[in-house]
Amino acid sequence: MGRILRRFAPQIQKQRSLLIGAFLALMAETLLRLLEPWPLKIIFDSILLPGVNRPAIVLPGIGSVSPLVLLSLLTVGSIGLAVLRGAAAYSSAAGMAVAASRVMAEVRGDLYSHLQRLSLSFHNQAKTGDLIARVTQDITRLREVTVMALLPLLASSLTLLGMVGVMFWLHWEMALIALGIFPLFVLTTTRATRRIREVVRRQRRREGAMAATAAEAMGAIKVVQALSLQSMLESTFFSHNRESLQEDAEAQKLSAGLERTMEVLVTVAVALVLWKGVQLVLQGSVTPGELLVFITYLKTAFKPIRQLAKYTGQIAKATASGERIIDVLDQIPDIRDTRGALTAPPFRGAVWFEQVSFAYDSGSSILRNVTFAVQPGEHVALVGPSGSGKSTLVSLLLRFYDPLEGRILIDGHDLREYKIDSLRRQISVVLQDSILFAASVRENIAYGNLDASNAEIEAAARLANAHEFICNLPQGYDTLLGERGATLSGGQRQRIAIARAAIRRAPIVILDEPTTGLDNHSEQVVNDALRRLTRGCTTFTISHNLHAVEQVDRILYIENGRVLEQGTHTELLALNGRYAKLYQLQSNVRSIHSKRSGENTVLPA
Ligand code: ADP
């Protein structure tokens, strides 16, 4: 808990005044609680035992009053104390709850922003569902437990301290007897707490895994149903579910067991005090009223310890949740703005890869000593077998990763000199399967440039050959798309993605197999849009279809992470190397296909 509180100190600091107010109310509540048994003590010692028929009782500072008047005063006093204590308790609980909610809302916001900024190397490893569980469930749990368990515990602990003080002041011997049982409490609690925490931590991890399984299955429900993977995924989910249930039950049992042990220990303490106390009363060294106060205190004072047993499970859960949140917050994005990074000036678009080598975490090297230069406005195609490193190469240009060796320059400056946002803003990307968001068509295009006007959005859609079909949608540009744009055809999605790329007016464009999987007509329409999108821009096209990139200014043939050949299509054919062979192979397959079906089809890789 200490680690969690320290980590969230900046957010807690902002609620300082509210927290101080709530804490003062808590102190008042404690004080009033300490006073609570005293009217009863006076009733016992000054009214009940001496007899109501006494003519008068002398009160210091007030004078003599009749027992009935004193009784009435004490009754009113008791009610007054209870009302005041209620008000103080309400203020402290409400204040703390509001402060806790505000703190956690801020932590949640920070966590979400942090997650969005973490590098791809983190997200590639992490499970989406588990991350979502952290942003939603874990934060909620931490907040609820802080309000429902931690704060009452804090209140009772303060009361405990106060009461122990008063008990020693009243009679130190009896106080010692009462507290003699304390070490046993500490021992039992620590041991049980440790076990509960272990179980709960395991359970939290399992719940994260469950969320991840569910998220993965729902995200790919089409594939799951098509491959009939339901039962397989269900059994994974169910087994996690069952084990989580068992762990939950185990934690509950441990917690309930601890609570009962505590109750027994409290009873023992009270019995011992009573045994000694009655003897002291009979000897006359303690009044019966004082013994009453003592016993009441003892019962109340042990409340936090009983509560600790009751809340241990919950607090352990919250701690586990807090740790899961902190684990993410402590992740440092490995790609981040370097110190002193500048906002990139408008690029001309000269790109230079200088002896670039790269490997993913898994170790084996993906790019080796890649060197090439691209002129502003030049159109370059990256071709080669699948898995040769083409997509990785453009990821480096976008600074999703940094090269292990060598550097990448734009207009003569290392990418790392620039702020990442300002770099990426000047690069447009169209991928094979463009992801659209569950928002309107207009918003989806505007995500390319959030400052774009409606006229610019429409112009971008026209450039992308998308205006016409968008107008035919039920609500035109305001039509809401399904999640990931699932309500559109592949070609339509690509054209919206092209409009989104166009609206950036970026000097550098990356096309990663943007027409793969489209039918011939869609491919033509999309290609036409792409030509307009890339006019005058430095363009990198990744393509497995060599016929589609014959016309580009230069072709880089990549195999095994190396640029083996480069030149125009004609030059590479004349070279008669690997490119020429691959081209020949594809031409043969193409002619067989067209003979069979009488038309050109999209070729497999
Ligand atoms: P291409 O685009 O030429 O098909 P990629 O650049 O996608 O090739 O992949 C090159 C190699 O890097 C492949 O062997 C692939 O398995 C590996 N790879 C791609 N992405 C990752 C990743 N996120 N983590 C680890 N390895 C990866």
Image: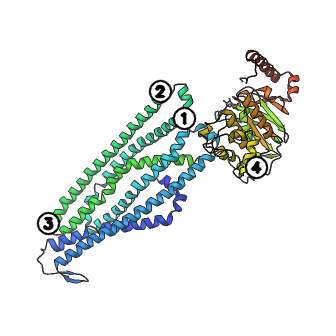
Pointer 4 residue: 417
Q: Is residue 87 left or right of residue 205?
A: left
Q: Is residue 26 above or below residue 133?
A: below
Pointer 2 residue: 231
Amino acid type shown at disc 2: Ser
Q: Is residue 26 above or below residue 128?
A: below
> In the rendered structure, which disc, 3 or 1, sits on the residue that comes first in sequence?
1
Rendered image: mark on residue 5:
none
Q: Position of residue 506 (x, y in %)?
A: 77, 45
Distance between mark 4 and mark 1 Cα atoms: 37 Å
Q: Is ligand 1 closer than 8 angstroms to the Cβ of mark 1?
A: no
Q: Is ligand 1 closer than 8 angstroms to the Cβ of mark 3?
A: no
Of circles 4 and 3, the one toward us is 4
Pointer 3 residue: 282
Quadrant observed for ligand 1 in the rendered image: top right
Tell me if label 4 and label 2 are in contact, CB under 8 Å.
no
